[in-house]
Image: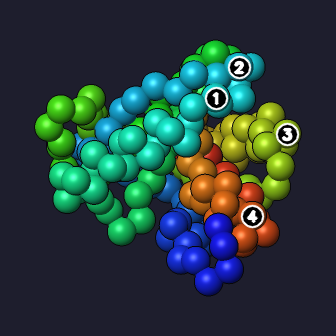
Amino acid sequence: MKDGEKDCCPKFNPKKYDNKKVTWKGKYFVKDKVFSFFHIPLNFGSVVEKNMKKIKDANAMLKEPIILSDEKSMFGSNVYISTKNALPKVHDVKLSGTFLTKVFEGPYKNMKKWIKQTEEYAKSQKKEVKNLYFHYPLCPKCSKKEGKNYVVIFAEI
């Protein structure tokens, strides 16, 4: 990103997601796969860009899209990008459920610690975690410009 260039990511407000309870009923997402090597994504950017173009072309872009990753395997994960509605010619899904959210800031090497803190937070709320989803609200360029590397963990309860 060059000086004066417009940010591509919406401004992130951590207070919106930190220690919150979120409930979705049939929230639309485009779903795709990312290849990883020991949880390091190899094609995350290209997968997101490809799907964001489809979402924009279908006029289904949200003001603040949520991009989730489920990190199901060391060698791949599913990526979910929120949309206004179902889209033609894509693999879309509806997610429903209740989630506890926590915001973290720092290097990805802290992920195990953040997961543990999220699980402890759920336990303190007398809830059991079914699944974890990870939201990266800023792309690498915007993260560098902001000087912050945020991760929001959505713990499905």
Residue 155 location (% of width, % of height): 56, 40
How far apart marks 1 and 2 lie (CA) works out to 7 Å
Which is more foreground, mark 1 or mark 3? 1
Graded by Cα atoms within 10 Å as few (under 14), some (14 to 19) or many (20 or more), the crowding at tag 4 reads few
How far apart marks 1 and 4 lie (CA) works out to 19 Å
Q: Is residue 101 above or below residue 38?
A: below
Q: Which residue is mark 3?
A: 109
Graded by Cα atoms within 10 Å as few (under 14), some (14 to 19) or many (20 or more), the crowding at tag 2 reads few
Q: Which residue sits at x=61%, y=56%?
A: 139
Q: Is residue 10 left or right of residue 38?
A: left
Ranked by sequence position, the earlier of labels 3 and 4 is 3
Q: Which residue is mark 2?
A: 37
Q: Amino acid at mark 1?
A: Leu
Q: Which residue is mark 1?
A: 42
Ranked by sequence position, the earlier of labels 1 and 3 is 1
Which numbered marker is on residue 144?
4
Q: Quadrant of residue 63?
A: bottom left
Q: Amino acid at mark 2?
A: Phe
How far apart marks 3 and 4 lie (CA) works out to 17 Å
- Viewer-closest of 47 and 153: 47
